Image (cartoon, rainbow, N blue to C red):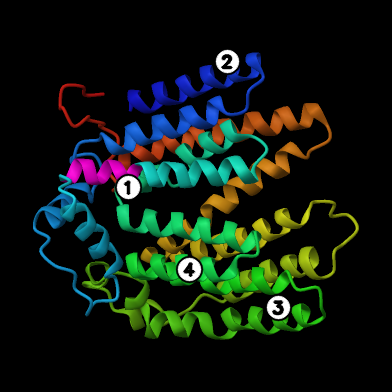
Amino acid sequence: MLVYYLFFVILVIVFFIEKKIDSRRILYSMSIILFSVLLGFRDSTVGNDTSRYLDIYNSFEYIDFNKSEYGYDILQYIGKSIGLEFYSYNLVLSIFISISFLFFFNKYSTNLLLCIFLHITIGLFAMSMSGIRQTLAVCLGMLAFDLINEKRNILAMLLLYMAFTIHNSSIIVCLPYLLFVLSRKKTKLKYISYLLLSLIPFFFLLPLLVRNVDLFLPQRYLNGIDVYKEFNSISPMLIISWGVLLLLSYCLVLFKISVVKYNYLIQIFFILSIFHCYMMLLGLEMVHLSRLSYYFRPYLIVLIVLVIDKIPNLSFRLVTYSILFILSLYQFVVYIPNSALKIDKYLFISESFLF
């Protein structure tokens, strides 16, 4: 665990150096380098799934277009074709993952260091050390969001399709992203579309997940699970919670209450965070479905940072920062050593540095 604490201490030092010389690029660049090193030079024993990815890569022979997740096969084919060993291949993927997260946090947040801290403690950092495919899908989803924000919807669709071919569960972002696209239209159609589309999860999400749960979850997660039994008695709280969260989104996006003074993107991040919350609630009914929340967690992190930075009272803002720091660090210290992701005992590839 020491390596992770040292990693963040280095970033804090870089942050103060950046402030002293008045440059906004140092922390961003150094964070990409450090994240890439930490992800790319980890041993196969770091991360529950890393050794499995190593075996899959070493035994890879051809692209199987008969399966829906052939996108990752294409990546392996490219890596094999140019003669990359697994660790070199993993380093390339790690650089892409690091750039994707840091680009997103740097562009949309007002406090990059806090975003990095939340990414490490409550974000997808631990997941990125183990679940390579899903992390790649999350990154492609974030880049697709950025393209939608830049009104480049065709390229965004291509990235979303690529994400789907790497990890089918990424299809879960299509509905909220479609709402995002429709909300850019300056006509009354967006209100009608938003209303109609928001009713889809309310009436059909749970049955759809039951009938097509294998679309969202790899078969290995379904072994020994009776899907219909798991959903035999759906808690009414799921329906109530969706209605409450949906009502809040109406208040922010549709009615534009005068109390809400946040900009348009904060409203969008709030909507995406609602999906994150609902996926976590679904996880209470079927634990593996909580993994779908990973696709929305970067937006929740940015939302937290933006909202806190907009607190006008300095004292209250500092108190909020302190509470957030304590709770997030506690989550990291307690969760990581007992996590199934198995990243607490970090080991570099050389196996000569054990932390």
- Nearer the observer: mark 4 or 1; the answer is 1
Tell me the residue that label 1 is attached to.
93
Tell me the residue that label 3 is attached to.
194
Q: What range of the chain is rendered magenta?
A: 86-94
Tag 4: amino acid:
Leu
- Nearer the observer: mark 2 or 3; the answer is 2
Q: Say whether disc 2 or disc 4 marks the residue closer to the N-terminus.
A: 2
Instruction: Tell me the number on the disc at residue 282.
Output: 4
Tag 3: amino acid:
Tyr
Q: Say whether disc 4 or disc 3 marks the residue closer to the N-terminus.
A: 3
Tell me the residue that label 2 is attached to.
17
> Which residue is at a point 53% across and 32% down the rendered structure image?
28
Mark 2 residue element: helix
Mark 3 residue element: helix
Tag 2: amino acid:
Ile
Front residue of 61/328: it is 61
Q: Say whether disc 2 or disc 1 marks the residue closer to the N-terminus.
A: 2
Above-or-below relation of 331 to 209: above
Specify whether residue 234 is in view: yes
Front residue of 23/207: it is 23
Secondary structure mostly seen in magenta is helix
